[in-house]
């Protein structure tokens, strides 16, 4: 059908590790709380590095939510996360805009 499946807000709430082996997931979207910790929390950074490595090992795309600063984007790129969403790239848009 040409659809891709994303596991949203990975690392919080109901995003269980078991979904990675049970569901046909194409993309992991890392919860914005971890992105916010870049440069402020070594634990958040460790989680980010681990999730990026996990995604790479499973052959999945990895996207970081909540990218607001160039420093966050640079850190994520160095960690191997090449996709991001957040105000650094543009504000949310309604369907059909942009």
Image: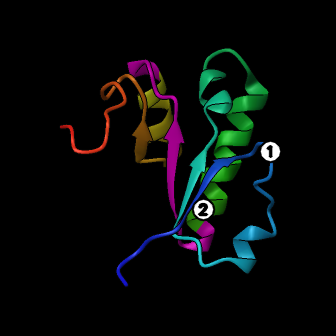
Q: Residue 22 placed where, x, y %?
A: 74, 79
**Residue furthest out toward the top:** 40
User: The residue tagged with tag 2: helix, strand or loop?
Assistant: helix
Q: On residue 55, which mark appears?
A: 2
- Displayed quadrant of residue 92: top left
What residue is drawn where x is 51% and y is 70%? 26
Q: On residue 91, which mark appears?
A: none
Q: Nearer the viewer, residue 31 or 42?
A: 31
Q: Which residue is mark 1?
A: 13
**Rendered-image quadrant of the C terminus:** top left
Left or right: residue 97 versus residue 50 is left
- Is 42 placed above or below 22 here? above
Q: Residue 46 placed where, x, y %?
A: 73, 37
Left or right: residue 12 versus residue 95 is right
Q: Are marks 1 and 2 in contact (CB under 8 Å)?
A: no
Q: Earlier in the sequence, mark 1 or mark 2?
A: 1
- Is 79 placed above or below 60 here? above
Q: Nearer the viewer, residue 96 or 40?
A: 96
**Residue furthest out toward the front:** 95
Q: Is residue 77 magenta?
A: no
Q: Residue 89 placed where, x, y %?
A: 31, 29
Check the image and tell me how it is coloured: rainbow
Q: CA distance from mark 1 to mark 2?
A: 18 Å
Crowd band around label 2 with a 10 angstrom C-alpha radius: few (<14), some (14–19), many (20+): many
What residue is drawn where x is 31% and y is 33%? 93
Q: Nearer the viewer, residue 5 or 63?
A: 5
What residue is drawn where x is 49% and y is 37%? 76
- Is 85 placed above or below 53 here? above
User: The residue tagged with tag 1: helix, strand or loop?
Assistant: loop
Magenta residues (range): 57-71
């Amino acid at each position: 059908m040409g659809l891709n499946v994303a596991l949203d807000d990975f690392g919080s709430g109901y995003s269980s590790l078991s979904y990675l082996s049970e569901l046909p997931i194409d993309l992991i979207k890392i919860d914005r709380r971890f992105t916010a910790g870049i440069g402020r929390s070594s634990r958040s950074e460790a989680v980010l590095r681990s999730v990026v490595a996990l995604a790479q090992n499973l052959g999945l795309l990895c996207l970081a939510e909540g990218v607001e600063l160039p420093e966050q984007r640079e850190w994520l790129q160095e960690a191997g996360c090449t996709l991001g969403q957040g105000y650094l790239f543009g504000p949310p848009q309604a369907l059909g805009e942009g």
